[in-house]
Structure formats: structure tokens, C-alpha cells
Amino acid sequence: MSHTMHDRHTHAPTFPTPASTVSTPVFTSLRYGYPFPALNEIRATAEKLSTQILRTPVWQWQTGAVNAAFSESTEVWLKLELFQKTGTFKVRGALNCVASLDASARSRGVVAVSAGNHAMAVAYAAKLAGISCTVVMPEFASPARIEACRADGAHVLLAKDMHHAFAWGKDIMEQERRTMIHPYDGPLTAFGTATVGLEFMQQVKGLDAIIVPIGGGGLCAGIASAVKQLSPECAVYGVEPYGADAMYRSFESGHTETLETVQSVADSLCAPYTMEYSYRVCRQFVDEIVRVSDDDICHAMSYLYKDVKLVAEPAAAVATAGLFGPLRTRLNGKKIGIIVCGSNVDPARFTELLLQAA
């Protein structure tokens, strides 16, 4: 369903004070008893992964749509995680999870559930580790992503939709005693994604805000935990599609939420539910969640292509859509960081979505 208005959700007063109001970068624990990625752990993870991942570049966007929409004092910096191995940030968490397996777990192999990017990352990590990998993907997954998983040696199973995929993946985990490498939940995943935030803060000093796409929240949880410990005054905004807004609804209700259906052009963000760990970390460190329409996402893809020559998949344009939509007025004149998270889209689909923005 197309939406013509943007909306937003901020923290309710009965929950922890937004992290941007914290006066010190020292945190001791997540409220409600959940641990979060501490800065020393994030740095240790970055060091551990340094030989297996790329330190992706940043680029200041200074042309076209940015010039037209914002004042001259506005700086927009892109963290180009779409240049990462396997084409997305997902490999950071996948490699960190696989590296933690003991010999017994490695012998049984791993299983993953994903519309594509996480499946590709886990297949790649399993290949490097020399272990067996099964991935469950929805039937609507990109054929190119399916073939990429198979090329890295994964056994690919196709489910009716994401709800069925998660149920099937759980059955495989229980029956075959494989380790589930979850696409967005858990400390090991967050430690991996936090390295994106660590790098960004090292590469661009003095950011006023960072905008992160949200599916299940694993990327945003990790980045936000790193950013707020390094620079508490830097705001962190999460952006979701209207058709896959589980985290927005979780912030609104105060607990994890399950969606009856998920539908968005940003299929990589179509998580059917939030989970406790990623939700609680986001709750602690993310200032606000906003939502954007599929039309907004297509226009953002077009801006990134025309101005920066990036072939960004829909999910990778969601943060940009948030900047040009619901966050535009309040971030005008600020120094802004945007996460461009992936590039796994086939040429035909990319062209189709650009034409929707024409």
C-alpha cells in the first residue's frame, strides 16, 4: 500500500531515556538485564575480522539531489558497505558467528534463514570455515542470490514465505542439530555489525546523526551501540518500510512484535518479527524509528544512481529515503552519515525499480 505521508515514533516516557541525552560514553549494561556490545568487545571483533572483511570506504555526497534538498552547510556522508564481500554488511556478523563454533558444532554445520543477503553471507562464511551449510530462502528471493548461495556450496531450500522459512529453519536446527546463524539477533551478530559503526566514526569525525536501515534490527543495534559509546551526542535514526515495520511497532508497544504479513520492495528488510536482543539494544541506543514508502525507496535508489553512480538494492536506499523524507527538515544543516548496506539486486529488477521513480 502506498503512503503519501511520512510518520515517526519516539520513545515513550515509561522506557529508558533516549541514549542521545546520556552525558557520558560509559555504559555498564542494557536495562532489563540484556548485555550489549561493549566498546572493547567491538574493537576486538574488528581486529579478529580484519583479515576477512573489507574496511569499506566513505564518500561525501555533494551533487544533485543533496544540493537541491539541503542547505550548503549540510554534509552527507555515505558508508559504502555495499562494496563489502558478498555485497552487504551481513558477512561481518556471519563470520563472527561461525568463528565462535566449537569443534562439535562445526561438525554438524549451520543453518540460516534469509531472503538472500544473510544466506549469501553465511554460505560464504561456512565455505571459508569448511563446514556444511543449509539455507532456507523464500520463493520470491532473487535468483541471483539463490545461485550465489549454491555457488558457495550451500544446500538451498525454498519456502512459501518468510514465516514458513523461519519455521522450516527451526525444524532443521532441531532435527539435524545444526547451529542456527540468525539473520539479525544475538550478541555475536551485533558485535559484527557494530564494526560498521566503529569504522564510520573513525573515518568521519563529528557526525551529528547516523541513519541506518532496519529489517530485524541487527545492523542498527550494532551500529547504534558503537556510535553511542563513542559519541553519545550523535543521534541514531532507524528507517523501516511501511510494509515491514516490526521494529517501529515494537517501539510503539514496548515489546517485540510479529507482523501478519510483510511486503516491500526492500525484500532484504522483510523481517516478520522482532526479537528480544536486537529490540532491546535498539531500544537502548536508537533515538527514533521512522518509516518510508516503497515509492520513497525507489526515488532514493534513483538519487544514489544518478548522483553517486551506485547500484544500491532497495534495502540499501532505505536510509537515504529516510533522509529525504521524514528526517529532511530536522537534519538540514547537519553533518549526516548514511549506511548504504548492500548491492545484491539483479539488473532487470534494478531497472524496473528505477523506472517506478521516473
Image: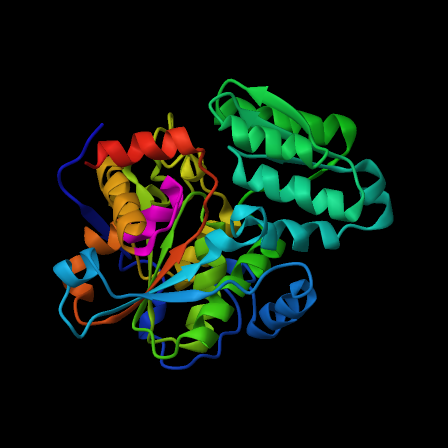
Quarter residue 356 falls in: top left
Q: Residue at x 43, y 55 (%)?
A: 220
Nearer the observer, 271 or 199: 199
Residue 197 to residue 320: above or below: below
Image-based side of 51 in relation to 80, left or right: right
Q: Residue 113: where, in percent of width, then height?
A: 58, 33
Is-magenta flag for residue 204? Answer: no
Q: Residue 5: where, in percent of width, then height?
A: 13, 41
Q: Residue 320: where, in percent of width, then height?
A: 29, 53
Q: Quadrant of the N terminus?
A: top left
Magenta span dominant secondary structure: helix
Q: Residue at x 66, y 62 (%)?
A: 49
Q: How many marks?
A: 0
Q: Quadrant of the C terminus?
A: top left
Q: Residue 317: where, in percent of width, then height?
A: 34, 47
Magenta region: 308-320
Which residue is farthest bottom? 24
Which residue is farthest top? 160
Image-based side of 221 in relation to 150, left or right: left
Q: Residue at x 66, y 55 (%)?
A: 96
Say if residue 50 shows up in the picture.
yes
